[in-house]
Image (cartoon, rainbow, N blue to C red):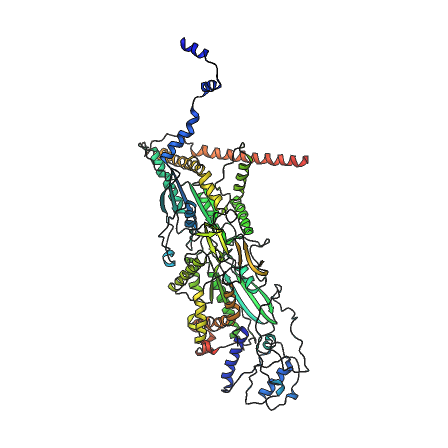
Amino acid sequence: MTTNTRYKNRPVKAEDGEEKEYVGFATLPNQVHRKSVKKGFDFTLMVAGESGLGKSTLVNSLFLTDLHKDRKLLNAEERIHQTVEITKHTVDIEEKGVKLKLTIVDTPGFGDAVNNTECWKPITDYIDQQFEQYFRDESGLNRKNIQDNRVHCCLYFIPPFGHGLRPVDVEFMKALQDKVNVVPLISKADCLTPTEIRKMKDRVREEIEKFGIKVYQFPDCDSDEDEEFKQQDRELKESTPFAVIGSNTVVEARGQRVRGRLYPWGIVEVENQSHCDFVKLRNMLIRTHMHDLKDITCDVHYENYRAQCIQQMTSKLTQDNRVESPIPILQLSTPDVETEKLIKMKDEELRRMQEMLQKMQQQMHEQDL
Amino acid sequence: IRHSSAAGVFKHCVHSLSTLLDTPTLSVHLVDVKSETTAHLLLHSLCWSSSSPSSVVSGRCPQDAVGWIFLVDTAQELDSELESPVRMEEESEVELQVEEEEPEVMKQPEQPPPCLSEPNTQGIIKGSDLFGYVGIEAAGFEFNIMVVGQSGLGKSTLVNTLFKSKVSRKSCTPNYEEKISKTVHLQSVSHIIEEKGVKMRLTVIDTPGFGDQINNENCWEPIVKYINEQYEKYLKEELHVNRKRRIPDTRVHCCVYFLPATGHWLRPIDVEFMKRLGNIVSIVPVIAKADTLTMEERLEFKQRIRQGLQANGIRVYPQKEYDEDAEERILNDRIRESIPFAVVGTDKEHQVNGNKVLGRKTKWGIIEVENVAHCEFAHLRDLLIRSHLQDLKDVTHNIHYETYRVRRLNESNANGLGLSALSLENGTAEKSEAESQL
């Protein structure tokens, strides 16, 4: 009783009312932040493309490290017999107390041989291997320390010498589009004039659409963001694929020391927005969309792989009638072949009817005009 | 005599005629021959010294005249009005006229009208006057250049820049039908370009589709086949019973191979191609789109390429074995130390310091194509056109073609065909013998 009267007698203040409604979960982001910073982040980036396109230089410029100090370039004889290798470098970098375990997966030998048929197979195999390993770990008994080696992003380097995508580029991106986030880049952009860069970007965008390649799409920003942010986002989307230049050297330009390349006719500054899109790439990759890349890898690509894997296994199980399976899985009711065919036929019919409907709508629309 | 193509021709004339006529005390004076009548006069006075100049029938010299070479013996006395030592005119830069694509002989606006009346003695020899008498037909010189490389490396732009005319259709122009073709097919386009009265029939053989597929095995075979076909054509013409005075020369004189500016090493496809073609045609490798390499990277890249060429036994032009004398060796050594040339090509002009220069304009500067501090285009042009053009043709004719000929004749001998009528002793060529087309 006494407590009640005490509360009643107190003059009602504004904070009191708020304190009554305040539960306190607004501090959750801070808690998450603190935990993540303690745990640290990890990110796996794959670079693919022919040799000599500046992949290693770009990675060094992006993360301001020097990952390939003692790299030995093979000569032509050794290279004739080389197959595509996969090499991994891991480096721990820290910035303002936030730790990042960065893994760079390099693919030397890609596209270098005379006959490059299926030269992307080692790469797709590697990505599948990482998925499989994560799948096993996830389904295992001890899930405390799962190492996530899945590839979160693949930067594909398109040579600037051609006129858009070459057959090997198209085939590679199609082979990888469902397994990893593919970000195409126009490399060594310092050999192109601004007009040529524009033309090349338009060509590449057209051909990506023409061949139906699913590259990584930036998520649309929320509609309640301010206009400036939306403008930036639009500019970012319109300037894909990024035309980048990388550099391992620091030169003196306009009184400052910047990362750049020194030519007799001028100095190319890597971080100058009017020279190349390096800054945009870095912002996109690291500062704004790194988590989105990881999310899509986990939610989309990995889940696709997992579903495929499970389906294969259950169909095998029902065929072989084996009781034991390597990992504990639910018995999915996989439809048998007949019903699957039926479903496919119905899907086709539906699609055709939708198309006809669209056509009729168009005709009606034209008649109205 | 400056090392130019005209002088080269002249050297060969002098060489071969001195062996023919076997006259040790021979000195050469260049005589101004503005009119064809004068030529007649001189010829008659030299060869048939019995007839007097006045009895020469004056008339125009036929279109396909085999040449007359004027060797003036100092002991012999000539009409004083005809003798006057003159100097060769310096070559200088001039815009070439752009001719249309049909390989017909266009009208000749710059030939001076032959004046039949007065033999002009003073003055400077113009190359055009000389060539009418040295056995080059009215179409001028012929030069066939082949460009090989992946698409987009700037082959057509470079050819256009080299010859300062639009001789090659660039694949980035709007109406160009471009699909990456499944096989390599060769396209050849001929033009007749003219500079200061000297005509040149330039044929550019393009090789679209080379190295563009995923599987590029044997993409060099169509090219090897084409080159051998041209040799075969020439051989057949040569062996003909009634053969033409001047056999049309479609053999590939020079093959420019474009290496992408990766900065690392020769790629396997480069090695395979150059190995196979280095023995049948003169290859000039160039680094394409070299504005992506800094100076240090360029030097390192070139060194690695040279090492790679040596390690694989690839012989590129100018080959060491065919240097004639010490002077040529010195010149060619200098060239050999700087191949492959790092080139940048363009057909756009910009203003730099008040001058119009050919260049590429970027946000960080203008790359001047003809500035030797920026790229080596000027060196390539000098090599291909100004100093070694005739040499390229000679090497093709005397070495590559003769090798092919010997091989074919040996084959046909082995097959028992009736080609054995030709003796094979004089088949192997020595370059100094200069079986020129005179």
| Residue B351 percent across, percent down from the top left | 59, 58
Please, is residue A203 above or below residue B394 in the view?
above
User: In terms of image quadrants, where is residue B268?
Assistant: bottom left
So how many labels did they put on this image? Answer: 0
Q: Is residue B279 visible?
A: no
Q: Quadrant of the C terminus of chain B?
A: bottom right
**Residue depicted at x 49% and y 51%:** A254
In the image, farthest residue toward the bottom: B50
In the image, farthest residue toward the top: A1
Near-viewer residue (A328 or B30): B30
User: In terms of image quadrants, where is residue B118?
Assistant: bottom right
Please, is residue A174 above or below residue B125 in the view?
above
Q: Is residue A50 left or right of residue B179?
A: left
User: In terms of image quadrants, where is residue A331?
Assistant: top left
| Residue B113 percent across, percent down from the top left | 67, 76
| Residue A227 percent across, percent down from the top left | 56, 35
Near-viewer residue (B97 or A351): B97
Q: Is residue B327 visible?
A: yes
Please, is residue A229 above or below residue B285 in the view?
above
| Residue B399 percent across, percent down from the top left | 46, 72
Q: Is residue A328 left or right of residue A193?
A: left
